[in-house]
Amino acid sequence: MASNNIRSPLSYHFLMINLLILLFISLLHTALATTSSSQTDNANYIEIACNSTTYPQECYKSLLPYTSKIKANPQKLCRTSLSITLKAAKNASSTVSNILKQKGLTRLEAAIMKDCIVNIKDSLAELMQSLDAMDHLSGLDKEFQIDNIKTWLSAALTDENTCMDGFEGEVISTIVKQKIRNIVLKIARLTSNSLSLINSFTYY
């Protein structure tokens, strides 16, 4: 009889532990399913938003890693896009500057690249103004602020295209030309996509 009295509490505790484990696993599965569903919804939101841009595939690819940050918030979507574009422009400016320092460039190549760097730096300034305005988007003049962002992004896109135009029709190394064009084309597409997202942005 004493032996049965000992086993009974142990069996009860063993049963309770199993039940708690099963409950924990159930709650974990529910949480994971909810998170997965939320991430899918956020990814779908980004995909739909990117469909309105000039380069939807590039847009979706660049923004997808930030789904949990963007969620389904249009202002965060635009801000993230601007931030990605600004970072790419900074990298482009640094890369072109490093290429300019390389030996073996002709005077014409160096002159064109210097002009390109000036255009990229102008673009950088305009992208920074756009991002700063997006970070401080508030008050009754939101429409005016959005219009300013559109103006700066349009100017940045013009500067980027001007840089690429400088390599057209000139006697310049194909390797140098292609390398620069690929770099600047990337930020031009990101800028164009950011402008498209801003154009679709609802601020009310």
Image (cartoon, rainbow, N blue to C red):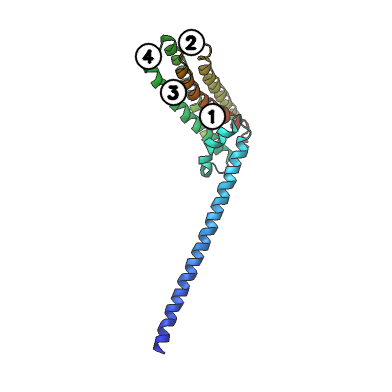
What residue did someone put label 2 on? 171
Figure quadrant of the N terminus: bottom left
Q: Determine the secondary structure under disc 4.
A: loop
Query: Mark 2, mark 3: which one is toward the viewer?
Result: 2
What residue did someone put label 1 on? 190
Q: Is residue 4 above or below residue 124?
A: below
Q: Which mark is residue 93?
A: 3
In the image, what residue type sits under mark 3?
A: Ser
In the image, what residue type sits under mark 2?
A: Val
In the image, what residue type sits under mark 4?
A: Gly
Label located before the other in sequence (4 or 3): 3
Residue at 47% over, 13% down? 172
Residue 180 shows up from this direction: yes
Label located before the other in sequence (3 or 1): 3
Q: Quadrant of residue 33?
A: bottom right
Q: CA distance from mark 4 to mark 3?
A: 20 Å
Label located before the other in sequence (4 or 1): 4
What residue did someone put label 4 on? 104
Neighbor class of circle 4 (other Cα within 10 Å; few <14, some 14-19, many 20+) is few
Q: Determine the secondary structure under disc 1.
A: helix
Label located before the other in sequence (2 or 4): 4
